[in-house]
Each structure stands twice: as structure tokens, then as C-alpha cells.
Amino acid sequence: MYTQSKSNFKQQCFRHIKNKKLGGVCAGLAERFNMPRWLTRVVVLFLFLKFPLLTLIAYGVAYYTLPTKSH
């Protein structure tokens, strides 16, 4: 049988309060996808420059729906 290790389980997305700049969404996504925080913030900035309304709506939805994490 195939067994999964703990690292293969799906991680939960959240807002990271300790490392936040605005709302903690980018910091939480960075930790979820194991990326540097600065890179996720740059990607969100470029998305905002290309699709401002869509990015604001997505960030707002993420801000209000994602649970918070302080550590």
C-alpha cells in the first residue's frame, strides 16, 4: 500500500500576523508554498500592476476568509 509522509499532507493557507506588511496574506502564502516572503510580495505587486481590480478583490477575499496564525 502507498503511505504518505507528514510532508505530503496538504498544508492550510492562513494569514501570518507576525510577518505581515499589510494583512499577512503574502506572508501566509509564502509559508504555505515554501517560498521567500519577498518573492510572493513582488509577484502580488506585479499582479496588481497588471490586474489591479482583480488583485484587490482576491487579496480582500483572502484577508477576510483566511484564518490567522501568529507564529
Image (cartoon, rainbow, N blue to C red):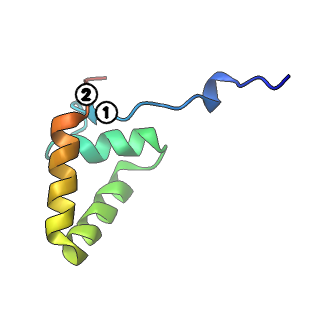
- The circle on residue 39 is none
Q: Earlier in the sequence, mark 2 or mark 1?
A: 1
Task: Check disc 1 and report the residue beneath it.
Answer: 14
- The circle on residue 67 is 2
Task: Give above or below for 57 relative to 67.
Answer: below
Residue 8, given in percent of the width and then of the height, sits at 63, 31
Q: Residues within 10 Å of mark 1 (few under 14, many from 20)?
A: many
Residue at image point 49% right, 43% down? 34
Instruction: Report, in whole angstroms, how far the alpha carbon at label 2 lies from the one at label 1.
Output: 5 Å
> Which quarter of the figure has residue 70?
top left
Decide which of 62, 30 is in the foreground and name it. Answer: 62
Secondary element at tag 2: loop
| Quadrant of the rendering where the N terminus is positioned | top right
Q: Amino acid at mark 2?
A: Pro
Numbered label tally:
2
Q: Are marks 2 and 1 in contact (CB under 8 Å)?
A: yes
In-image side of 8 versus 39 (left or right): right
